[in-house]
Image: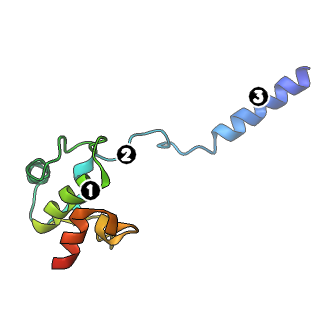
Amino acid sequence: MKNINLFLIIVCISLSACIPKNAFQPGPPAFKGWVKADTSEEEVKQEMLNCGHQNPYTPDKSDTMNDRAIKEICMFNKGFKRNEGNFKGICYGLNWQDKPACVEYRKSH
């Protein structure tokens, strides 16, 4: 029995060394996902609020995908880009045809 307990302790200690330091840290605030040249973080936050976001720090959990698309399109129309590489937005992903905001947006772009 002592050998099993010792073995389990060694396994737990070994496995805990495999977990990255920031594994349980929260992600970055939502406003950090948007970039625009010569725009301060305060301006990004304000534009997010102007586009309907309730809080520039966290995603609006009650939003539907269409709500998210509307807010995202608003930010794109203000000249912002996502800082996630070539991400063009929700309206260029799968099932965009189901979102009325995307249908209108794609007609004009």
The disc, 1 or 3, on the residue closer to the chain's N-terminal end is 3
- How are the residues colored? rainbow
Q: How crowded is mark 1: few (under 14 residues within 10 Å), some or many (20 or more)?
A: some
Q: Mark 1: which amino acid?
A: Asn
Horizontal and vertical percent position of residue 100: 24, 63
On screen, residue 24 versus residue 104, left or right, reads right
Residue to which mark 2 is pinned: 27
- Label 1 to label 3, Cα distance in Å? 49 Å
Q: Which of 93 and 8 is in front in this view?
A: 93
Q: Can residue 64 be seen in this view?
A: yes
Q: Do the residues labelled 1 and 3 touch (CB within 8 Å)?
A: no
Q: Which of marks 2 and 3 is in front?
A: 2
Can you say which quadrant of the picture contains the N terminus? top right
Report the disc number at residue 9: 3
The disc, 2 or 1, on the residue closer to the chain's N-terminal end is 2
Q: Mark 3: which amino acid?
A: Ile
Q: Which residue lies furthest to the top in this view?
A: 1
Q: Quadrant of residue 62?
A: top left
Q: Mark 2: which amino acid?
A: Gly
On screen, residue 37 versus residue 6, left or right, reads left
Q: Is residue 77 above or below residue 64?
A: below
